[in-house]
Image (cartoon, helix red, strand yellow):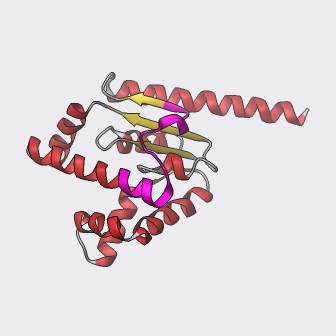
Amino acid sequence: MIAVSGQVGSGKTTHAKKLAETFNLKYVSNGMLFRELARERGVSLQELHRIAEENPEIDRIVDSRAREAAMRGNVVVEGHLACWLLRDIADICIFFKAPLEERVKRIMTRDRVSYEEALRDLQLREHSNWNRAKRYYGVDIHDWSVADLIIDTSKLSIEAVDAILISFVQFYIREKLKEIRKHKC
């Protein structure tokens, strides 16, 4: 089970999907689960974020659904808190980061919005995520020590980052297999 976390706009979704595809794992996104819950409740994504600020049950529902998927194994779970909340069952935790300006540009392109709108959305989501993580779980999402691998996605192309990730996971698998063989002897 691979847990993927990262800053808003850092590329965590893109790279988590690639990992799932490459290793034939199921892909589960907390963002997808959050959007699904918004649809179930008949509210917008922004409105559910506002509700979640006051009601810890929203995050607990989403996180519980992600944990259930993780417990079944053979999955990549991607979410802002995935590395922290799934560390106890994750084989690998990966964190993605990038400078603010780069992340704003990516959101502008992805969502086809102005710079100001992208910046405002990014800051609102990051503040909301940080605040809820701290209040509901006692987690500081600025402490990345929980990650086994941290990648600044602004330094390399998408393909180069994917190559590093795939190599990391392949080496992890090889080491685990060596360990298993060693214990059988």
- Whether residue 145 appears in magenta in the rendering, the answer is yes
Residue 178 in the image: x percent, y percent?
A: 76, 29
In the picture, measured across the screen, residue 52 lies left or right of residue 133, that is left
Residue at the image point whose x is 28% and y is 52% from the top: 125
Q: Residue furthest right?
A: 185
Residue 92 point in image, percent of width and height: 58, 39
Compare residues 20 and 98 and report the one nearer the observer.
Answer: 98
**x and y percentages locating residue 27 in the rendered image:** 46, 52
Residue 110 in sight? yes
Quadrant for residue 68, please give it. Answer: bottom right
Q: Residue furthest bottom?
A: 41
Query: In the rendered view, does 40 fall on the left or right side of 61?
Result: left
At x 84% / y 30%, what residue is drawn?
A: 182
Between 76 and 44, the residue placed more toward the observer is 44
Above or below, 3 relative to 153: below
Q: Would residue 10 be counted in the magenta stretch?
A: no
Residue 157 in which image quadrant: top left
Residue 25: tell me if it is visible. no
Q: Which residues are magenta?
A: 130-149
Residue in the image at 20% along x and 43% along y: 107
Q: x, y (%) of residue 148?
A: 56, 33
Image quarter in which the C terminus is found = top right
Q: Nearer the viewer, residue 51 or 36?
A: 51
